[in-house]
Image (tube, rainbow, N blue to C red):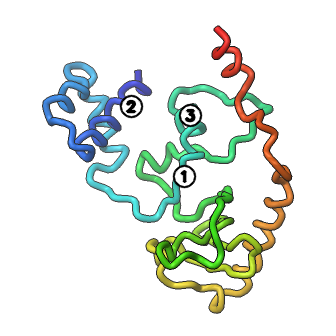
Amino acid sequence: MKTKLLSLFMLGLALPSFGVEQDYVDRAIPTGEQENEVIALAQECGIGKVDRASIVSAVDLLPTFCEIAGVQLPASYQPDGISQVATLKGKGTARRKKPLFWKAVAPWPARKSKPDHWVSYAVVSENWKLVTNRDAKHAELDDLIADPLEKTDLKAKHPGKANQLRKMLAQWQGTLPAKSTGEVFSNLRNTEKTR
């Protein structure tokens, strides 16, 4: 019941920001006996509170939804993300404990038409983000809390942090396959396709 109420409460918070009509939002929020529970959840989440510090990624969705639903991930599965339920409840933290890594295909040097599209690799750890081009000869370091728009490159001011993140990124790159195997879907998904 609490999971459903939290989902409906979050839906009620999110829908107006997507331009959904208020009468639809009103119908999504429970009434009667459930109203007190929704109010309690709203108070727990912090009505009107804006979190400008927590760092959340799409890879956090699965662990977050599983925690909300009370479902354990298989012991053999190691998610890239972390549960963000505390963040949804207004108790987030500005320092991400588990690093995020990603790889993209980007030209270097950057094209004049897209001067910000040069990043091939990135790592986010705690409040820091390091981005590099394909061969890691160019890098930028940002403090995502102090500078969320990433306007100031801090690698010269914090060379130790930049080197630490470069090492983390290099270690992660060493775990990547040389090329894609093509087997990116689970057996369950492949089975469903054949039905």
The amino acid on which the numbered mark 1 sits, given as a three-letter code, is Ser
- Disc 2 crowd, CA 10 A, few/some/many (<14, 14-19, 20+): some
According to the image, label 2 marks what residue?
7
What residue is shown at x 67% (from left), y 79% (from top)? 139
The CA span between labels 3 and 1 is 16 Å
Determine whether 113 is above or below 122 in the image. Answer: below
Which numbered circle lies on residue 67? 3
Residue 114 visible in the current orientation: yes
Q: For numbered disc 1, what is the local secondary structure?
A: loop
Q: Earlier in the sequence, mark 3 or mark 2?
A: 2
Judged from the image, the secondary structure of the residue bearing numbered disc 3 is: helix
Residue flagged by tag 3: what amino acid is it?
Answer: Glu
Q: Circle 1: is it few (<14), some (14-19), or many (20+) Cα within 10 Å?
A: few
- On screen, residue 135 versus residue 27, left or right, reads right
Vertical side of 20 occupied by 59: above or below: below
Q: Are marks 1 and 2 in contact (CB under 8 Å)?
A: no
Residue visible at 66% across and 58% down? Answer: 102
Going from the N terminus, do you reach mark 1 or mark 2 first?
Answer: 2
- Mark 3 to mark 2 CA distance (whole Å): 12 Å
- Quarter that holds the C terminus: top right
80 or 96, nearer to the observer:
80
Which residue in the protein does label 1 denote?
57
Q: Quadrant of residue 30?
A: top left
Q: Amino acid at mark 2?
A: Ser
Q: Are marks 3 and 1 in contact (CB under 8 Å)?
A: no
Q: Position of residue 116 (x, y in %)?
A: 51, 74
Closer to the observer: label 1 or label 2?
Answer: 1
Is residue 146 visible to the viewer in this orientation of the structure? no
